[in-house]
């Protein structure tokens, strides 16, 4: 089980990323547009740097929904490998069965 503070911090990052997504996209479009004057592009990059770092979606970490584990996650199920195997063995995941030879 992951520390509660780590899970809560990640949830905060998810909320901030959603809140600032439109603003970030607009500023990035201006900063990457070659047809805009260099002064405007530089100003957009400065405004982008002023935004909170945790509002970037790249900072959000994929964590297990059950345990909060940050490593060994399957995106499709949003579960870590340990819980995925456990739930699959119990028959909790539809269509997934333990393989046997």
Image (cartoon, rainbow, N blue to C red):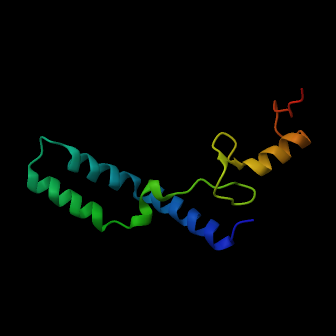
- The residue shown at (15%, 58%) is 42
- The residue shown at (21%, 48%) is 30
**Quadrant of the rendering where the C terminus is positioned:** top right
Counting the numbered discs, the total is 0
**Residue 40 locus on image (x, y percent):** 13, 54
- Considering depth in this image, is 99 or 34 the residue closer to the camera? 99
Q: Residue furthest top?
A: 101
**Residue 62 locus on image (x, y percent):** 59, 53
**Residue 75 locus on image (x, y percent):** 63, 43
Q: Residue furthest bottom?
A: 5
**Quadrant of the rendering where the N terminus is positioned:** bottom right
Name above or below for residue 93 compared with residue 69. Answer: above
User: Left or right: where does residue 31 sit relative to residue 36?
Assistant: right
- The residue shown at (64%, 55%) is 71
Q: Residue furthest front?
A: 101
Name above or below for residue 30 compared with residue 6. Answer: above
Where on the picture, by quarter, is residue 58?
bottom left
- The residue shown at (43%, 62%) is 55
User: Left or right: where does residue 88 sit relative to residue 24?
Assistant: right
**Residue 48 locus on image (x, y percent):** 28, 60
């Amino acid at each position: 089980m992951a520390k509660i503070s780590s899970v809560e911090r990640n949830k905060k990052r998810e909320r901030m990323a959603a809140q600032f997504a439109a603003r970030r996209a607009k500023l990035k479009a201006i900063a990457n547009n070659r047809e805009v004057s260099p002064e405007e592009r530089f100003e957009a990059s400065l405004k982008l740097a002023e935004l909170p770092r945790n509002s970037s979606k790249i900072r959000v970490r994929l964590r297990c929904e059950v345990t909060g584990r940050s490593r060994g996650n399957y995106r499709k199920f949003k579960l870590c490998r340990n819980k995925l195997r456990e739930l699959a063995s119990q028959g909790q995941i539809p269509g997934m069965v333990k393989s046997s030879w």
